[in-house]
Image: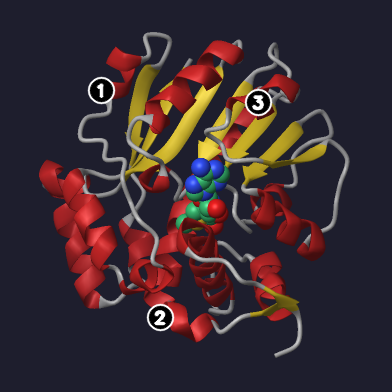
Amino acid sequence: MAGEKVDLTGAKETMLMTLYGKALESRLPDSLLGDHFADEAVRKIAYDFARLKVDDNLGVGLAIRAKTLDLRVEDFLARNPDAMVLHLGCGLDTRIFRIDPPPGVDWFDVDYPEVIELRRKLYPSRDRYHLVASSVTEPAWLADVPRNRPTVVVAEGLTPYLPADQGPRLFARLVSHLASGELMFDAYSGFGLKLLRLNPSVKATGAEVHWAIEDPHELERAIPKLLFVEEIPAYKPEHAIRMRWSARLFIRLWRHIPALRKVGRLLRYRF
Ligand SMILES: C[S@@+](CC[C@H](N)C(=O)[O-])C[C@H]1O[C@@H](n2cnc3c(N)ncnc32)[C@H](O)[C@@H]1O
C-alpha cells in the first residue's frame, strides 16, 4: 500500500474513523460537508480503512455534526474577525480548510504529537495557523496561546476519550487563561458511553471512553465562569433524510425524548 504509513491505536486511531466518514460523505452527490480535503487525505494514507467498518450512514452522521459545528464557528468569526480558534483533539479534521478563516484570525489545532506529525505531512501550512503537538490535558501548551483575544474553543469527538477528572480541569484551565469566548463540543451520557463501547468502529480501534456528562449545568457548577448557552440541535430532519431508516427513527425519538438526547449531543457555553 503506497502513501503515509499510519500506526496508531486507541483514541488516536479514532481520528481515521471520523476522517474516513467525512471522506465517504464528500463522495455522495448531495454531500452536505463537501470535505474533499478529507477525501484527498484518505487517498494519501496507507491504511486499511475497511477495518474501521465505517459506512455512508456513519459518514452522513459525522458530516452533519461537523457542519453544525462549522456553522457555529463561522458565526463566531463573523462577529469577532480578530478572534482565535482553539480546535482541541483536531485529529485529521480539515475544519480550517473548510472554513478558510479571515486573515485576522489565529487558529490552533491541538492533538498528540504523532497526530500533528501526520497532519504536517498531509496538509499545507498557512499564515496564522499553529499546530500544537501535545495532549490537551497537558497544561504547558496553553502558555503560548495569547490571552486577550475573543476565542472559540471547539472539540469534536474528544470529550469521551478524556479521563473523567481531566475534562473539567482542562475546561477550567482554558476559561481562566482566556479572556472571553465560547466553548462547543459533543458530550455523552453514561449510557452514551456504553453505546460508544459497542460501536463497531470505536471497538476496532480499542479506544477506551471515560468522561460522561449527564447534565450540561454540571460544568457551570464546577467552573463558575462558564455559562451554559444551549444544546445545539444537531440533526435537522432535512439533513437526516439521507440516513438509513433505523437511524432516522432513532433521531426522531432522540429529538423528543430527553433521556435519549443525553446519549450524544452538542453543547455550547460562553465564558
Ligand atoms: C474521534 S477523533 C476526532 C478527531 C477530529 N476532532 C474529528 O472530528 O475528525 C478523537 C481525537 O481526539 C484526540 N485526543 C484524544 N485524547 C486526547 C488528548 N488527551 N489530547 C489531545 N488529543 C486527544 C485523538 O488523538 C483523536 O485525534
Residue 5 vertical position relative to residue 266 in the rendered view, above or below? below
Quadrant for residue 210, please give it. Answer: top left
Does label 3 or label 2 sit earlier along the sequence? 2
For the point 46% across and 34% down, the residue is: 184
Kind of residue at badge 2 = Lys
Instruction: Find residue 53 and name its label.
Output: 2
Kind of residue at badge 1 = Glu
For the point 32% across and 22% down, the residue is: 219
Alpha carbon of mark 1 to alpha carbon of mark 3: how far?
A: 26 Å
Q: Mark 3 points at which residue?
A: 140
Element type at mark 1: helix
Does label 1 or label 3 sit earlier along the sequence? 3
Kind of residue at badge 3 = Ala
- Crowd rating for badge 3 (residues with CA inside 10 Å; few <14, some 14–19, many 20+): few
- Residue 49 is left or right of residue 86, and the answer is left
Q: Nearest the camera: 251 or 265?
A: 265
- Crowd rating for badge 1 (residues with CA inside 10 Å; few <14, some 14–19, many 20+): few
Does label 1 or label 2 sit earlier along the sequence? 2
Quadrant for residue 105, please give it. Answer: top right
Percent of width and height locating residue 86: 63, 33
Q: Name the residue under label 1.
A: 218
Q: Nearest the camera: 161 or 244?
A: 161
Alpha carbon of mark 1 to alpha carbon of mark 2: how far?
A: 34 Å
Mark 1–mark 3 contact, CB under 8 Å? no
Percent of width and height locating residue 14: 48, 63
**Viewer-nearest of labels 3 and 2?**
3
